[in-house]
Image: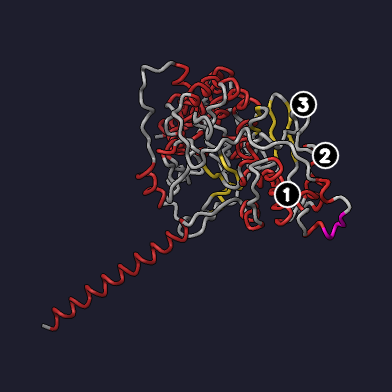
Amino acid sequence: MRSVLMLLAALALHAEAATFDSATVERGRYLATASDCMACHTARHGKEMAGGLLLSSPVGDIVSTNITPSKQYGIGNYTEQQFSDAVRKGIRADGQNLYPAMPYTAYAVMTDDDIHAMYAYFMQDVQAVEQDTRPTALPFPMNVRASMKVWNAIFLDAKPLKPEPQRSEQWLRGRYLADGAAHCSSCHTPRGLLMQEKKELYLTGAQVGPWYAPNITSHPTAGIGSWSEAELVQYLRTGRVEGKAQAAGSMAEAISYSFSRLSDADLKAIAVYIKDLPPVAGEDPVSRFNRGQAGNALPSFRGKGFTESVKGPHLGAQVFSANCASCHGANGQGTADGYYPSLFHNSATMNNSNLLATILFGVERETRDGHVFMPPFGDQANAVNHLSNDEVAALANYIQVSYGSGAPGVKAEDVAVIRQGGPQSHLVLLARLGMIVGLLALAALIIVALRRRQSKQGE
């Protein structure tokens, strides 16, 4: 018996000391980068992969978890199979289901070899952080994680990508990255009532919290059909294509932590695949890249008193003059080097969600080309950088009229929605109503059954 115990102890010690070769670990690091794990699992100014980031969703806020190899607070006790189940099936080691804010529906297509490499990286190269995160507390009944088993049974497609031998290796690699690790569809595909992706509207644009992820199909006006492959590669590497787009929000994070760190070959493969997608107009067939022109309405409030302007028709111009013109120019033309972009021929001004989110939350991204920063003007804790909902609405309307679509349509209530994290889904209310209807129906069936029983006993 003693020899058996010693053997078991030796095996346990060997398992504890097991290591992965450096090539596997390095490949796992690259795949974790391609999967953009850092962006969601690292809180602002927090420790890498230690979780704690608040993710806005249409059904409530979700808190990202610690995915360092901490045995107490992270995934240090996960076996490779448990790690695979979490990444590709959305099932934690304790058997509880993850919410699809974790894009396991996309990671499901990743190969066993790639999951093995990622496991090696997380267990051997990521620094363990002994730090807990507060649990996600969604409203009832969304907090019942078991409901995700039904959701997964209906919507999770765990099958490998369909073989397409007629396609080039470059196209296949681009599809594998775009549909898998890079999970483009998780943000750019609109979702249905049950938060499932609408496959028929693949990559045609969707609301993601306060931001809007636009149409990236090859449609010439609604999508990015007017872009060249080189421009798409440039955008993924730097977050900017002059006169067309600048990345902000979650896309800026994806570029900072993921796309800008991928190889040129992989960026090219993604561009080849995305550009080859069929054109789909989606919900908004209007081009967002070439509208608007330079303008300057600032003279309209010169000579006006502050109190007259602050509630009058000149409020938007005044807020622009005080907060925006010094960087973007009095005519909205931006700077010559493009660091501060033009406000016309700018896709951000063509979508109210993105325009408001940019004003409220600012822009920050870091790539090999340098650091890009615009301060947030919705900062509640900083009076200097805090604009009220009325001021933000007036500013957004001024920008739309002067440099964008030409039509003001933003209200203070719209600003409030974006400030709080974006539009909320009616799913919580519908689920509660459904449960009430179900309980009432069940009660009715029980009453009918009891009455029938009593009736038979009385005969």
Q: Does 314 lie within the magenta span?
A: no
Along the line of sight, which residue is nearer the eye, 120 or 249? 249
Name the N-terminal-most of marks 3 and 2.
2
Mark 2 lies on a secondary structure that is helix
Which residue is label 3 attached to? 337
Mark 3, Cα crowd under 10 Å, few <14 / some 14-19 / many 20+, is: few
Q: Amino acid at mark 1?
A: Leu
Name the N-terminal-most of marks 2 and 1.
2
Which residue is label 2 attached to? 326
Q: Is residue 273 left or right of residue 257?
A: left
Which residue is label 1 attached to? 395
Dominant secondary structure, magenta: helix
Along the line of sight, which residue is nearer the eye, 247 or 286? 286
- In magenta, the rendered stretch is 304-308
Q: Is residue 230 above or below residue 417?
A: above
Mark 2, Cα crowd under 10 Å, few <14 / some 14-19 / many 20+, is: some
- Label 3, label 2: how many angstroms apart (C-alpha)? 15 Å
Asked where in the image residue 359 lies, by quadrant, the reply is top right
For image coordinates 83% across by 51% down, the residue present is: 301
